[in-house]
Image: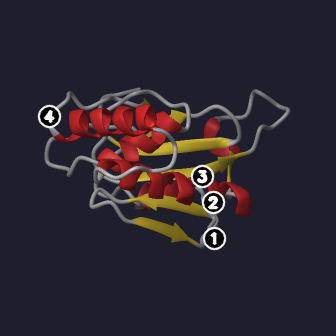
Amino acid sequence: MTAYYLVVEPHRSLRPVRHVPTPDVIAAEFRPGPVGRVLLPGPLIGFVAAPDPERARNPIGSCLLACLGGPLGVFAGPVVITGFNPATDVALSTTDRIGPLTFGQADLIAGLVDAIRTAVEGFASGRGSSWDRSVRVHAASVTDGGRLTSPTWLPGYAPAGVA
């Protein structure tokens, strides 16, 4: 899959985007509203919307973040996954380290989204019955009114009154 970043929409679709991810490009995915980041292990970073009961909950995106090593959270609105440049200068901010996904990363994430969708729909994903059951339980908690998770705010894109 050729994509510079991927968007998991609340209605379960995966949208590859062929545009270099920058803070402004990522923020445009969430308008109106602030953008938060979810740090993931390895060379990936996730972006999510501010907790907003008016936004559609995103069970597939929430499960994806957890499967990629992020928090077991409840997120609404789109979930965006980009690459993360592990710069040697740790003084650089997260926004300076956003990068495009590699082909391998995009394919891995697309396959994981397919497996999550399959498990949520009640079918065997091929990853084992325990994994499928865990994904279904978490997706149900997202859909059934779990408390929305507050992310770490992207500098310059936080809600009013939040540093």
**Residue assigned mark 3:** 82
The reply to whether the C-beta atoms of the residues labelled 2 and 1 are less than 8 Å apart is yes
Q: Say left or right for 66 vs 34.
A: right
Q: Secondary structure at mark 1?
A: loop
- How crowded pointer 2 is (Cα within 10 Å; few <14, some 14-19, many 20+) is rated as many
The percent position of residue 54, horizontal first and vertical second, equals: 14, 48
Is residue 160 visible in this depiction of the protein?
A: no
The reply to whether the C-beta atoms of the residues labelled 2 and 3 are less than 8 Å apart is no
Q: Secondary structure at mark 3?
A: strand
Which residue is found at the position 67% from the left and 54% from the top? 105
Query: In this picture, is 22 found above or below 90?
Result: below
Q: Which mark is residue 106?
A: 2
Q: Sequence order check: which comes first, mark 4 or mark 3?
A: 3
**Residue assigned mark 1:** 1
Which residue is found at the position 41% from the left and 26% from the top? 163
Q: What is the CA distance from the residue labelled 1 to the residue labelled 4?
A: 33 Å
Q: Amino acid at mark 3?
A: Thr
Q: Secondary structure at mark 2?
A: helix
Q: What is the CA distance from the residue labelled 2 to the residue labelled 3?
A: 9 Å
